[in-house]
Amino acid sequence: MKTAGLSLDQAPPLWVPTVFFAMVPLACAVAGGLLLVHGAEPLNGPRTPASTALTHVGTLGIVTAAMLGAMYQLVPVAAGARVPAPRLAGAVAAAYALGAGTLIVGLATARPSAIGVGGALLAIATAVFAGPVGWALLQAPGRGPTVVGMRTAAAALAAVAVLGIVLAASRAGTIPPPPDWSAARQAHFGLALLVWVGGLVAAVSWTVVPMFYVAAEVPAKLRTAIAAGHVTSLIALPTVAFGAPHPGLLLAAAAPAIVASWGLHPAATLVSLKRRRRKRADPSLRAWQGAMTTALCLPLLGAAALVWPDPRLAVAIVWIAVWGWAALVIHGMLGRIVPFLVWFHRFSQRLGEPGVPSMKAMFPDRRLRTGLIAHGVTLVLGLLAIGTGWDLAGRAAGLGLLVTGLWLGAALGGVLRRR
């Protein structure tokens, strides 16, 4: 079965992507629990144990977990290359969840042994994921922008994992620290957000935005420029971090990906959505528009942080990048992709028979809209806590994260139970 150039007949079993998608609401609830316990402390400044733990709950538990599931689904469907041994995804999910949880506990409690064990488990999960998925991407017959973007993102994930393992192992005392700890940490963070997340968000958007919203495709030259920005920073950031670790050079190395992920791509996506042929706006489309708008604010905040070195600006950048950009896209797309996958796997062969639900009936717009409203309110409450340092605002943001996670989890559970 082919739809809009997608090879749906090569799709993996339903459980493969959804076991990773299921981690997203759980991680939202964990992040909410951290803020409910600690108040505004994790949002008061970077590099405290609670702040570092909260950041990794967002980047590992919410963003990367969803993106691993998306890669398992999109590589065979959009790139046309079947991922070998799909059942290994179960081992990847188990090692990933256990590793991320152990690492986050270690970071929150400043226990080097837990950080080392968590890093080792994540290394195993990444290796078992990267082998089959990387092989499939290399063998993929497609050469379009989505395939190129996924290859770049996969390479960035490998680089992020290697840097993360080095940092975790050195924190645990297993290996000597890198020559410049700060530069390695900044390269790790920059590759994670700008190239791994930014590259995959762009690659996915070039397939799903035209398909789901009947929107115009981003011009080929602009897609090439975005991909070139990601590739340039993918090469430059590790080179600078370990070869010439200077703050100015690190910023220059990250600049192409900043322009690509938080400038060209969101602007192009907003224009594409504005010119869509289907004018009805559903909640998932609003999520894309909101996420792309917040992405455009991030370079401005970065410039302000260079002029006015207030630690709250650095925390605000991370909060907006994770919760207001990447997680907002993920939240909106889970409301479209999970019903589509359930309908395709369980109901597509019974089309026209009595009792076959529509995708909209499985995940109604009002349910997704309520979750996204909670998501947006939480974003604002977090920014209020960052700006004021009020514990009450921090705990309110934690409650918002908890409510958003529980609501999303209940909605996804309802869809997955449909048979």
Image (spheres, helix red, strand yellow):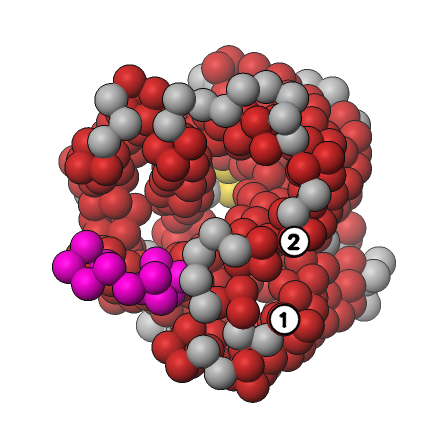
Residue 158, placed above or below residue 23 = above
Tag 2 residue: 108
Which quadrant does the N terminus fall into?
top right
**Position in image of residue 355 (x %, y %):** 81, 68
Residue at image point 38% right, 36% down: 182
Instruction: Check disc 2 and give the amino acid type.
Output: Ala
Q: Magenta stretch containing residue 400, yes or no?
A: no
From the viewer's perspective, is 4 left or right of 161? left
Tag 1 residue: 38
The front one of 29 and 179 is 179
Q: Magenta part mainly helix, strand or loop? A: helix
Residue at image point 77% right, 41% down: 98
Residue furthest to the bottom in view is: 392
Q: Quadrant of residue 153?
A: top left
The front one of 275 and 60 is 60
From the viewer's perspective, is 228 left or right of 193? left
- Under circle 2, the secondary element is helix
**Position in image of residue 184 (x %, y %):** 40, 31
Residue 58, placed above or below residue 195 = below
Q: How crowded is mark 1: few (under 14 residues within 10 Å), some or many (20 or more)?
A: some
**Position in image of residue 191 (x %, y %):** 39, 35
The front one of 198 and 85 is 198
Q: What stretch is highlighted in magenta?
A: 305-317
Residue at image point 78% right, 58% down: 416
Instruction: Check disc 1 and give the amino acid type.
Output: His
Does the rendering let one see residue 168? no
Does the rendering let one see residue 202? yes
Q: Residues within 10 Å of mark 2 (few under 14, many from 20)?
A: many
**Position in image of residue 90 (x %, y %):** 79, 34
Q: Quadrant of residue 119?
A: top right
